[in-house]
Image (spheres, helix red, strand yellow):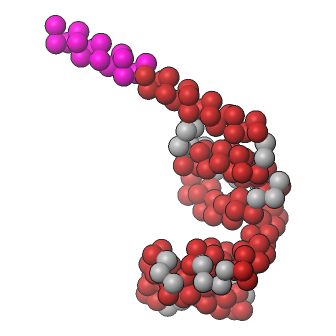
């Protein structure tokens, strides 16, 4: 009797889980169908992190590119940050190095414009520090810009910036 009850509970759980996953998946599909810069960005986030869709960084990158083409500069930042994910998973990204560089430059330009309006925004300083990261083969001037933004973000209370700043000091950056 206990086995039958246990099996029945398992079947109910699987059915409910499947229905729930289908519902989430349809929400992501609706976002994609809306085809605007924010809906595509939200769908990309769902694929990147596996929230509402099966985790798939290739599909996330494609959606970030589409959102970026429609004017979402946060998507350009996320294209830049996805590069490491592709390297870690040995997956070929659906964008070229040229597209990657263009996205990085668009993100920098837009974050610097925002920073002119909000000079004490720790998240903007942090994102600019990431974009000027010396691990991507940048010049000495850009390395100094990276340090400046990381230092300012940490001073303004950005937790991840504080952690990175401590880590950078350990490695002599």
Q: Kindly tell me whether residue 116 is visible in this rendering.
A: yes
| Residue situated in front as seen by the camera: 113 or 161 | 113
Location of the C terminus (image quadrant): bottom right
Question: Is residue 21 part of the magenta span, yes or no?
Answer: no
Q: Quadrant of residue 35?
A: top right
Residue 141: percent from left, percent from top: 72, 92
Left or right relative to 126: residue 10 = left
Left or right relative to 64: residue 120 = left
Q: Residue furthest front?
A: 117
Residue at image point 56% right, 33% down = 24
Residue at image point 73% right, 83% down = 116
Q: Quadrant of residue 7?
A: top left
Question: Is residue 6 part of the magenta span, yes or no?
Answer: yes
Q: How many marks?
A: 0
Residue 30: percent from left, percent from top: 69, 34
Residue at image point 56% right, 28% down = 23
Residue bounds of the magenta highlight = 1-15
Q: Quadrant of residue 125?
A: bottom right
Identify the main secondary structure in magenta. helix
Residue 45: percent from left, percent from top: 61, 50
| Residue situated in front as seen by the camera: 94 or 69 | 69
């Amino acid at each position: 009797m206990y086995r039958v009850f246990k099996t029945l509970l398992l079947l109910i759980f699987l059915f409910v889980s499947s229905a729930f996953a289908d519902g989430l998946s349809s929400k992501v599909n609706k976002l994609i169908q809306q085809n605007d810069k924010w809906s595509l960005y939200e769908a990309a986030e769902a694929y990147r992190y596996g929230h509402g869709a099966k985790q798939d960084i290739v599909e996330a990158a494609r959606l970030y590119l589409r959102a970026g083409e429609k004017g979402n500069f946060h998507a350009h930042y996320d294209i830049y940050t996805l590069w490491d994910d592709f390297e870690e998973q040995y997956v070929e990204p659906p964008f070229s190095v040229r597209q990657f560089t263009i996205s990085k430059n668009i993100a920098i330009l837009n974050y610097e414009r925002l920073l002119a309006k909000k000079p004490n925004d720790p998240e903007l300083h942090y994102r600019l520090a990431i974009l000027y990261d010396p691990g991507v083969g940048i010049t000495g001037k850009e390395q100094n810009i990276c340090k400046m933004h990381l230092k300012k973000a940490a001073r303004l209370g950005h937790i991840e910036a504080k952690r990175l700043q401590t880590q950078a000091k350990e490695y002599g950056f």
